[in-house]
Image (cartoon, helix red, strand yellow):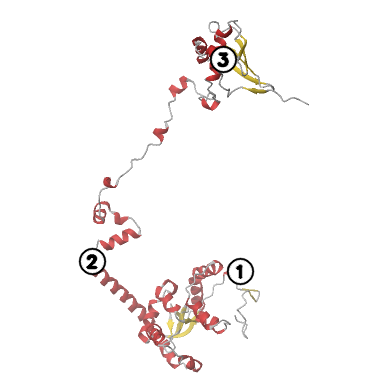
Amino acid sequence: MTSNPDIIITCGFQTIFYEAVQNNKKGMTLANCGHVINCTEVIINDGISFIKSLVIRQASVSNPPYEVKLEVSKSLKLYYCPAGAGKKCKHIAALVHYINQEDVKSKTDFEKQWGKPSKAGEEKYKKGKTISELFIPKKKFKANDLQEINHIELVSNYNILDIPCSFTKLLSVETKTELERECESCVKGLVDQTEINELYSRHGPSLDFILVRQKLMNFSNFNNFYKFPLNINEYNYYLNNIVVNDNKMIKIFIQTIKQSESKTWVEQRQKRISATKTHQVINTRMSYQKVANILMSNSVLKGKASINVCYGLMTEKIAIESYLKTYTECDYIECGLVIHTEYPWLCASPDGLIIKNGKVDRVLEIKCPISCTNTPIETDRKLNLSYLKYDSYGKV
């Protein structure tokens, strides 16, 4: 069998109790002055340890250092004293004191030496700051240190209303006097009414024509639906929110000229069956209640549908200009939400009305398919859209 190898220790020595050297001051002085170097302990199999080190001479430091050895076991005894002083040897005392007072340090415990500038360089290029200079602690404010200030002082002394944010808008309203608010409301009302009057002057004849056509049309198929049973709450809601007379129909039409940009357009259209929803209602296989819930839900367009709508809005004006250049004998007016006064649960909001000889000649509905962004609608007598067909005259 092979014996276990000896264990060699160069740091982390166990304390040695050796009374003979406890009060040897010369040995303590040698150890404290760093004269003990290259200390090594070898532990052999039978539990005995041998410790040896080099001790630099006290007087002749240039001469080779003494080699001091100790044998450590249950009973400590001197092994070798280079000066032959036995138990009174200061070199052995220095080694024992070094072991008992060992302070193990690594390279990271000392200041970096590589790349260290010379003293002349440090004096010439002084730089750097201490941690306390780099990170000055912030003064902690207490509630008592804060001065009271109101919004009136902010407005009058600091021009806070020049900052574009919702808070300054609220402050601007708050700081106005009652007279200023009345004047602003009056002016806004006059401007809105002027705009409505101007829109009506342009759209009035067309709206009158639409109202007349609505009353002349006879949707006999709707008669049964018109008499559907309602409870008292549903009936009141129907009268207050669905039924419109001629004046209210015209007012809603004018207010919703901007269509999807108008809050009124969204609200009035949501509680009715619009032209775009008709196909879904007629061809549905779901229950009427589920269809009603879907129609009433204010869903937000996402993904591809949102991209298609944005593309349509961007190209709509270009399409209108192209149409008017093609049909020069016609005029174009914007169209708001058209509610059928006889069947007020029906509505439509086409992209425009085409006026010819002072009357509504046709409805303009613009389609800007994103699939034709980089492809013409027609190439070599072939239509690139499935819902377009040639008529008997070869026209699209």
Q: x, y percentage for residue 115?
A: 53, 25
Look at discs 3 and 2 and give the one toward the viewer.
3
Q: x, y percentage for residue 229?
A: 45, 90
Instruction: Check disc 2: other Cα within 10 Å, few if <14, some if 14-19, many if 20+.
Output: few
Q: Please tell me whether mark 3 sits on a helix, a strand or a loop.
A: helix
- Residue type pointed to by label 2: Glu
Residue picked out by circle 2: 180
Q: Quadrant of residue 372?
A: bottom right
Q: x, y percentage for residue 109?
A: 52, 26
Q: x, y percentage for residue 110?
A: 51, 24
* Mark 2 or mark 1: whose residue is earlier in sequence: 2
The answer to whether residue 35 of the structure is visible from this angle is: no
Mark sitting on residue 375: 1
Is 87 left, or right, of 159 in this rendering?
A: right
- Residue type pointed to by label 1: Thr
- What residue is rendered at 47% in x and 77% in y? 296
Mark sitting on residue 95: 3
**Residue situated in front as seen by the camera: 110 or 24:** 24
Q: Quadrant of residue 181?
A: bottom left
Instruction: Give me the C-alpha separation between circle 1 and circle 3.
Output: 95 Å
- Residue type pointed to by label 3: Leu
Look at discs 1 and 3 and give the one toward the viewer.
3
Is 213 left, or right, of 191 in this rendering?
A: right
